[in-house]
């Protein structure tokens, strides 16, 4: 079974499910149409309401779209964090950003990554949007002391990498064992 | 190091109509050009990108990114010119442009 949309058709059998604040956006592929249905238990339309008046329908639509506008504004991009002997290494997925559009700051043991995802193309007519846009933010507590002046952030292939060198005090070190010299 | 079984990841995309034809934008964070494969075969466009996993020999404290291979397949309408498809990978976004076939066939007047 294939889904047709515009000039491109996509192999079916996949379901896009995005859960946002209890609201589910699901691809409705039952009737071979590429359509999104918004399923929300709190917005359920009873059969009696549905056959009511057109104004009732209008109200229902208004509520529906209002609900969409109220989706949580701030996204939380995925992170990986590793602890090595000398450094902490953090990876964050941020496809399609400019280097200058990503804010990385460190304050009192908390690393903060923030910015805003903007559409790449404004002029072209979009007929299907899956990529998320809007503000994103992550704050993560780094478990050990680090040297803020030596933190290094790089952005390659849509992935932000932050290397946080450990402060001397939190590095593992050998403790010499003292005692009487073996005779 | 991540040990979970590599999975097939479904990249999110935006799809546009342009003056020239169609354009699609796929999110492939962590995929470099060498690990990307785009194939057009029998009117099917297959995009496959292996992501280089987060590299560290250290202790994993947090692991949220999915591990696996991005894969998505499209049927390309015959009105689009398969020979002139172009693709560009930048900052984890793959942009594929599919121009429409020239509908007007110009006949030179001799």
Image: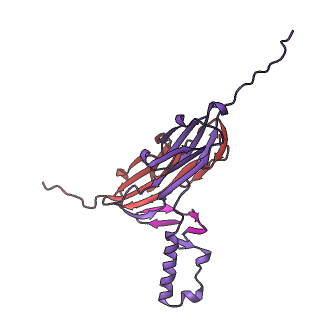
Chain colours: A purple, B red
Pick the front one: B25 or A2: B25
Q: Is residue B11 something one can see in this rendering?
A: no
- Return the residue found at the far top: A183
Name the image quarter holding the C terminus of chain A: top right
Relative to B3, say whether B27 is above or below: below
How many marks can you see? Answer: 0
Splitting the image into 4 quarters, where does residue A126 fall? bottom left
Quarter holding the N terminus of chain A is bottom right
Left or right of B90 on screen, residue A41: right
In the image, is A53 to the left or to the right of A46? left
Residue stretch rendered in magenta on the structure: A1-25
User: Residue at coordinates 61% horizontally, 68% vertically from top-left?
Assistant: A22
Residue B54, horizontal then vertical, whole percent: 58, 41
Residue ID at (50%, 74%) = A66
Q: Looking at the image, which residue is at 76% across and 21% down?
A: A176
Quick one: A64 or B105, which is closer to the camera?
A64
Secondary structure, magenta segment, majority class: strand
**Nearer the observer, B64 or A74:** A74
Determine if residue A174 is in view.
yes
A8 versus B86 height, above or below? below
Q: Position of residue A37 (x, y in %)?
A: 53, 72
Q: Residue furthest left?
A: B110
Residue B35 drawn at (x, y percent) = 50, 42
């Amino acid at each position: 079974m294939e889904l047709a949309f515009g000039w491109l058709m996509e192999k079916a059998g996949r379901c896009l499910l995005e859960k946002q604040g209890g609201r589910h956006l699901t691809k409705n592929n039952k009737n071979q149409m590429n359509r999104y249905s918004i399923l929300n238990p709190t917005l359920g339309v009873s059969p009696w309401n549905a056959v009511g008046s057109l104004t009732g329908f209008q109200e229902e639509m208004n509520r529906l779209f209002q609900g969409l506008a109220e989706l949580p504004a701030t996204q939380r991009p995925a992170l990986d964090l590793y602890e090595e002997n000398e450094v902490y290494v953090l990876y964050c997925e941020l496809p399609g950003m400019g280097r200058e559009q990503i804010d990385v700051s460190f304050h009192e043991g908390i690393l903060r990554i923030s910015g805003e995802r903007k559409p790449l193309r404004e002029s072209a007519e979009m007929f299907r949007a899956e990529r998320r846009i809007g503000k994103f933010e992550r704050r993560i507590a780094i478990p050990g002391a680090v040297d803020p002046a030596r933190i290094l952030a790089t952005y390659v292939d849509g992935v932000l990498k932050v290397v946080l060198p450990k402060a001397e005090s939190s590095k593992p070190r050998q403790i010499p064992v003292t005692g009487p010299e073996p005779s | 190091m991540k040990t979970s079984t590599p999975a097939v990841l479904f990249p999110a995309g935006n799809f546009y109509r342009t003056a020239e034809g169609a354009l699609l934008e796929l999110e492939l964070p962590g995929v470099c050009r060498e690990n990307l494969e785009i194939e057009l075969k029998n009117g099917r466009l297959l995009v496959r990108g292996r992501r280089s996993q987060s590299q560290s020999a250290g202790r994993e404290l947090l692991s949220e990114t999915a591990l696996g291979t991005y894969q998505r397949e499209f049927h390309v309408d015959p009105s689009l010119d398969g020979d002139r498809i172009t693709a560009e990978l930048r900052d984890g976004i793959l942009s594929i442009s599919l121009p429409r076939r020239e509908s007007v066939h110009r006949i030179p007047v001799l």
